[in-house]
Amino acid sequence: MNARLKELLSHLAATLTLEREREIAARHECTLRHEPVDRLPLITVYPFPSQCQWQPFPHREVFDDPEKMLFNELLSAWGTSIVHRAQVGDDLPATIRADFGTVLVASVFGSHVEQLGDDPPWAEPLASREQLVEAMRRGPVGLDDGLLPRVVERLRVFRDLLDQFPPLPEIIKITLPDLQGPLDTLEMLCGSELYADLAEVPEQVAPWLDTVAAAQVAIARALQPLVNDGTDGFTHQHGFMIHGNVLIRDDSAIMLSPSMYCKQIAPHDERVLSELGGGGIHSCGKFMHNVPGLLGVPSLRCLDFGQSHMNDVDAVYVQARVRRIGLVRVRVMREELTSGSIHRRFPTGVTLLYPATSIEEAREVVAAYRKTAG
């Protein structure tokens, strides 16, 4: 085992506690159910401190090295840090994943994956419409397809390494990797031509979306025995707890009208969510035009924001609380936290994200926020 990783795991085994993890989990679960909470869960993001005795490996090195990937996941992911949580005092769950970016399901259908420098991998569209049609005819998906063997390897290595440092196997949740969603994956396979197809030949696109949705469900089910992320209807993505067992990424849907989303995409999102026992939908950007359609998906349990500040979160909250749908990763201002006004704005049903300029500011804001509770 890499000496730096061994040192980090030893430190975490000595400092993380199951009691604290359960406290954090209970707070997230209560608010995502729209139940009363002592305070809304708050997670801070901040630049990784240069004075830390451990520093992340360059991102380009983690794809071929399971130990380096685990090291980085424990140290710095999504602008958060498990190793610094005790210092900051926020409600960050301890989670890791096999991080190969957004391309896993696309790779199963034959998309060529590239990765350069420290950029995340990306999937190239299939070279021709004939290749796409042939890909959509493929049989059942297995863990031997595309990049999935590498994901399986990572998950097994992660579990083997954590097992050597009790109580970490009980504390650190290994989550599903990013499986995107039917629309986002199909857009990777088709390229931008997909948007013209959705408008001009929707009857041709519908079975493709269904095929991709079935593949996502099959992959999630096949990977679930290799993760340890919850058995009670709550799991994790993006460093936050979500209500449900899977998070669909619907970033491409911001290009569609509300009618197109509801008629052409929502049924496939619902298939994924319902077959996996409910879950969340994520979108980056400004997606207010599709909020009613998203909230109308029957098996939706939470809505995850990429950039909540680009949306009218208060209006979304009014609509979401009717169905007790939680809002995840809502960015808030420092004054809202330190004054306690956030408790009046959102009594429950929301998990908060604060972008701090430094780990010192993160600690100050969390301490002030905790004093406002109760």
Image (tube, rainbow, N blue to C red):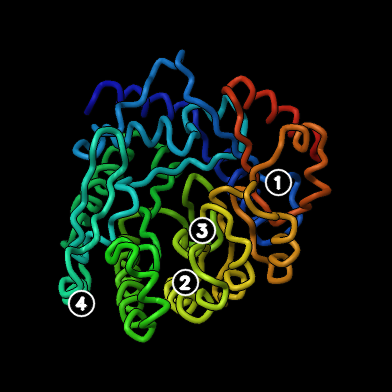
Rounded to the nearest angstrom, the CA distance separating label 4 from label 2 is 25 Å
Of the pair 125 and 23, the residue shown nearer to us: 125
Which amino acid lies under the numbered mark 3 shown in the image of this protein? Answer: His
Quarter of the image for residue 33 reads: bottom right
Marks 3 and 2: in contact by CB < 8 Å? Answer: no
Horizontal relation, residue 347 to residue 167: left or right: right
Q: Which residue is mark 2?
A: 273
In terms of secondary structure, where does tag 4 sit? helix
Q: Which residue is mark 3?
A: 282
Quarter of the image for residue 21 reads: top right
Which amino acid lies under the numbered mark 2 shown in the image of this protein? Answer: Leu
Q: Which residue is mark 1?
A: 40
Marks 2 and 1: in contact by CB < 8 Å? Answer: no
Return the x and y of residue 336 as percentages of the image width and height.
77, 38
Return the x and y of residue 109 as percentages of the image width and height.
21, 66
Q: Which residue is mark 4?
A: 133
